[in-house]
Image: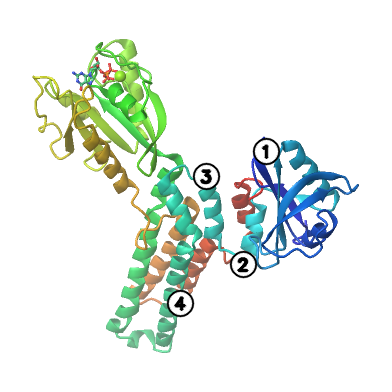
Amino acid sequence: MSANDSIVAAATPIGESAIAVIRVSGTLCQELCKDALRVPYPTPRRSILAGYRDIEECLIDDVIFVFYEEQNSYTGEPSLEISSHGNPLITKKIIEDLVARGCRLAEPGEYTKRAFLSGRMDLTQAESVATLIKASSERALEVARIQLRGDLGKKISDLQSRLLDLQANLEAYIDFPEEDLPSEDIKGPSDALANLIAEVDHLSQSAGCAQLLEAGIRCLIVGSPNAGKSSLYNLLCGEQRAIVSEESGTTRDYLFSRIEIGPFMVEMIDTAGLCEGGSTVERLGIERTLQLSEEADCFLFVLDSTLPFPDSVGKVLAEKINAENCLIFENKIDLDDSQDLNNFLPNFQHLRLSLQTCEGLGDCRTAIELMMQKLVPPPSDECMIVNARHAANLAISSDFLREAHRLLLEGLSIELSILEITSGIGALGEIVGKTNNEDMLDRLFHSFCIGK
Ligand SMILES: Nc1nc2c(ncn2[C@@H]2O[C@H](COP(=O)(O)OP(=O)(O)OP(=O)(O)O)[C@@H](O)[C@H]2O)c(=O)[nH]1
Ligand SMILES: [Mg+2]
């Protein structure tokens, strides 16, 4: 495969649609304008109406195309975007013709890979293109947009340049015989290094958030039998999915739905009530609830406020729930014998509501969204969201920097410490892709869709 060969792919999903877009990138583009579209000198970045003729000179379709010059396109190469009528047969014929004229079918992510290789974007930006396309919630979109803007790349460059300054600073100490070096002199660079390590570590901590954005936040509705868990589930999902009945132990298998709550995609799960004893089937349901709790990100704990609080039920989940990841919903406040259950898990936020009359439901929705806001805070300069690949490189960098710090603190060797910092800077470089690692690039871009 030559770096300069021209590639072609459908940029829109194949199917009946108003229009279909075909994308070409590479040196053949200018020639294609002349031969297939009969517009030898297209004005770049302008929509032009033309007939697309195949290699046999037969008209395939009337199309609108845009020509992009080298350095002024997504890939950095001469490019063409051809919009035809959205009939899969037309798309197929045009693509086949483009192949007959010397283009090659693009591999997944190949346009973005070329954009990266031509220096149009760093690796974090290239990755964010895929994240942007796959984003399933407002927050995921926001994070991808910020990354596409290059903010994470800038943050990494800033860390690298401060580490380089620090190295320059340390070079000045090399000429001192180590035993003569006053320990207070090394304190400045060593403190600066400790701060940089803290920043690197802080950045990598947000990798969990990326996972929550990608997979959705898993929210488990738990509580004692008959408390109103399925009623809550149905209201949040906006449809009568779960069976609601006055019979205790109605829900046995769990149910789940992907729903949007504020800017988040949430996997909402209705579970079997937790209780002691019960039938074999009920006990199996409870076991399943406990298994699900292992992988849950947050909990909605529903109580029947007309009954004494079920201490044993709280204990079952004690290791999984805390004041940050769990809200207590005291349900059935429409009934006369409803009481405050504040003494049940008193440090947790309690909300009183009626799922029958919907009183208090608005506050509950707000509280759920706030709890999720804390789990996945909005991205900012202080809190950027990194993916698992970035986090792995940040961890490697952090290890090198810690070693450099140890060497400095223990007065062992400034030269070795400088070398460790160089490795730390290199690991940061992998994040933005300054270093060439073909394997990693192939793996990364293959997760993209074709045509991107
Ligand atoms: N009065 C009143 N009844 C409610 C309220 N919420 C739910 N119920 C009733 O309580 C009963 C149990 O509701 P479900 O939603 O099935 O409760 P659950 O927790 O899913 O029950 P299991 O699946 O059996 O554990 C039903 O008869 C509901 O109509 C409420 O706010 N007020
Ligand atoms: Mg139920």
Badge 1: how crowded within 10 Å, few (<14), some, or many (20+)? some
Give the amino acid at mark 3.
Lys
Spatial CA distance of label 4 from label 2 is 23 Å
Horizontal arrangement in the rendering, residue 47 relative to residue 289 (left or right): right
The answer to whether the residue bearing label 3 lies less than 8 angstroms from the nearest atom of ligand 2 is no
The quadrant in which residue 155 appears is bottom left
Give the CA separation, mark 3 to mark 2: 24 Å
Q: Which residue is mark 3?
A: 134
Please, what secondary structure does the residue beneath circle 3 have? helix
> Quick one: quadrant of the N terminus?
bottom right
Instruction: State the CA–CA distance, disc 4 to disc 3.
Output: 36 Å
Residue beneath label 4, please?
164
Rendering coords of residue 222 (x, y %):
28, 27
Q: Quadrant of ligand 2?
A: top left
The alpha-carbon separation of the residues under discs 3 and 1 comes to: 18 Å
Q: CA distance from mark 1 to mark 2?
A: 30 Å
Q: Secondary structure at mark 2?
A: loop
Residue 167: x and y, percent?
44, 79
Q: Which residue is mark 2?
A: 119
User: Closer to the camera, 122 or 204?
Assistant: 122
Label 4 lies in ligand 1 vicinity (Cβ under 8 Å) = no
| Mark 4 element type | helix
Residue 320 appears at what percent x and percent y? 28, 36
- Taking the spot 24% from the left edge, 40% from the top edge, the residue there is 367
The residue lying at 31 percent from left, 37 percent from top is 298
The mark lying in front, picked from 4 and 3, is 3
The image shows residue 229, relative to residue 426, as above or below, that is: above
- Nearer to me, 240 or 122: 240
Q: What residue is shown with label 1?
A: 14
User: Relative to 25, is 262 on the left or the right?
Assistant: left
